[in-house]
Image: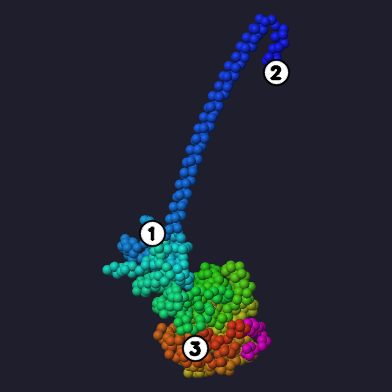
Amino acid sequence: MKIVDLLKPVVRASSRYQLRVLNELVQHKLDEVVVGLDNQSRLFHDKLEKVVAGVDNQARLLNDKLSILIDLQKAQIAAIDDLTAALAEPGRQLRSQDFVQEIQRLGIHPFILVGLGQNSTADRFIACTTQNDAPAFVHRLAALPRFADSLLLRGIERALQQEIYDAGDLLYRWTRGDGALAETVQVLKADVQGRYNYPVFAFDAGSAPSGQERADALLAMLETYARCDGNDALRFSLMEAAALALGRAFGARGNFRQALAAVDKGLAVKPYSIHLKAAKHTLLLKSEGKEVPPRLEKFAGEDNGYLRQFVCPLPFERFDIGPNGDVLVCCGHWLPTTIGNFMNQSVEDILNSPTALAIRQSVADGSYKYCNHLECGTMAQDALPRREELDRPRTRKAVAEKNYRLDGVDQLMFAFDQTCNLACPSCRTHVITEKVSQSLEKARAVEEKLLPLLPSVRTLHINPAGELFGSKPSRKLLEMINDERCPELRLDIISNGTLFSREEWNKFPGIHNKVRSVRISIDAACKETFEKLRRLGKYDVFLKNMRFLRELRLSGTLPQLKFSFTYQLDNFREMKAFVAFCDEMHADFAIFERLQNIAFTEDEYRRKAVHHPEHPLYAEFIEVIKDPVFRTKRVWHDFDYDGVDNLSREEARNRISSVEVAVNAPVAGAESTAAL
Ligand code: SF4
């Protein structure tokens, strides 16, 4: 309601004077109200101004802070950009002079010197002064930033760790121009004292050579190491790896002459290198325009992946104890890497050592990097099983799950004693008889470590290192075998036959129903050759023993009888007659294997190794083995020679299956397998 409306009744009742007074009063009050309102609004206005000013200040502060934050962020982004650019950029170029100065500072030319391009001042070099420092040096190398991107330095590191196949593969890939890292090898010019003789390496350092230049740099490294002295063990390993890589690098470019020259440089210091021998064989075939078995193609260029379809079961199933206790998982000529030592380690530690696991992985992933691709008979006959054909559940499971640890062995090879009554020239230069103390120590190890394992072992091979009937530890082991102690065990016996008489056989009744096969190494088909190659052996005694074995074979006591023959200059013309001798003695198989160099000098070996294409009688040898008798199913051999036909893969595999069925049949009442 308005004030005028409130005053209306008063106005009607009042005199003019009262009204005037009232009017003045109202006016006065109104003035007061207005003044009050003015004051309040002024105060309100002032306060509002203060608030606005405060907000302004806060906004300014906030704005300032935001600007600072934005600037900070910009600075951080710029720093990250700089860092990224620095990492993406190749490191600082290293000149020969930098290496020379470092060598002068050290006062010695280290065995291996690596310059680091990415380090501007301190720690610009790491050195391996001598090969004795290799473990610590390898450790420092592996800790370098971007080491995983390296092919050259990783190749060097693998070679120092004796992983030659891997080393060769990495170095080969480096020569191909692969790899994200700028790195190279340099050969310094010798100073007047000739101190600067080892090659040096630049890691993550500016621009690197590419393609052919890299192969040339690696060749220069190989040649320089060949001229150097000292640190022989690891220097030779570096040469072996480089030669392997160069065989592939030049081979891939069709330059077989240069590839062979590089491989020969490696072989000069590592004559027994299984990979270099395979490389040489492959490159020779290529250089002559001949066909190369698919498994060997990778030694003259790219890996065609042929072996990836197969898995060799032996590393999962075998445990071979050698004369000094070293344990292998295959024949030592075919896979010479040991997985542990029986005298110093427990069986479990050996079985699952890092090397054992690596070997199993290599046959599962198809690299076969520890295997002798050239001489492995299973590979040569193309008889490796495909992964789906593996028959032992433990092996199948390990391969399928990629878990290569094992808890037992199927096959035990007892080659723990070299004692033998003979001194065959192909095997040894003199008669070997172990000392009594040594025999006793070995017998103790057998009793403590081996016997507990026997109940689970399915096959025992005894004794490829010596003559079982002439060895105390072997005889002790034979005495311990019987049905109660090892019900599953079957024996494969290897013997020279000269002591394998009826009398000896009757001393070990526990093995009579457990023998699966007997293999006699003979190497001759007549008395004269036998007594030459079986030095100290008497042919007449030997023949009598072979007739006894024929008796055991015909009675079914022996499910399988095999005679073997290592061919060489002194006997290759008797190879066909040897097959006839096997027939006469009712042997199931005649086995032919090339001569290995175990006891000869290099010259003697070259003179006897008639299977080498450079041998003057090689052509005659090839004519001998072309005879159809060597393609029959009862003849096993490692022939891998141009112009010589072998059984087809299918025939070879069928033969293995039929042998396994026959040989694993129960002994008692077993039918003869001589007709195989
Ligand atoms: S592939 Fe040959 S060398 Fe390798 S483990 Fe098998 S049998 Fe031995």
> Residue beneath label 3, please?
567
Image quarter for ligand 1 equals bottom right
Pointers 1 and 3 in contact (C-beta within 8 Å): no
Res. 395 image quadrant: bottom right
Query: Which residue matches tag 2?
Result: 1
**Separation of marks 2 and 1 at Cα, in angstroms:** 94 Å
Cβ of mark 2 under 8 Å from ligand 1: the answer is no
Q: Secondary structure at mark 1?
A: loop
Rendered image quadrant of residue 241: bottom left
Callout 1: 10 Å neighbours few (<14), some, many (20+)? some
Label 1 near ligand 1 (CB < 8 Å) = no
Q: Position of residue 560 (x, y in %)?
A: 61, 86
**Which residue does the image show at 50% across and 76% down from the upper left?**
298
Residue type (three-letter) at the residue carrying disc 2:
Met
In the rendered structure, are the residues bearing label 3 and label 2 in contact, judged by CB atoms less than 8 Å apart? Answer: no
Determine contact: label 2, label 1, CB under 8 Å: no
Identified by mark 1, the residue type is: Arg
**Magenta-tinted stretch:** 655-676
Judge by depth and name the residue closer to the eye, 570 or 300. 300
Q: Is residue 440 above or below residue 506?
A: above
Q: Position of residue 543 (x, y in %)?
A: 54, 93
Q: Which mark, by number, is residue 92?
A: 1
Disc 3 crowd rating (10 Å Cα; few below 14, some 14-19, many 20+) is many
- Amino acid type of the residue that numbered disc 3 sits on in the rendered structure: Tyr
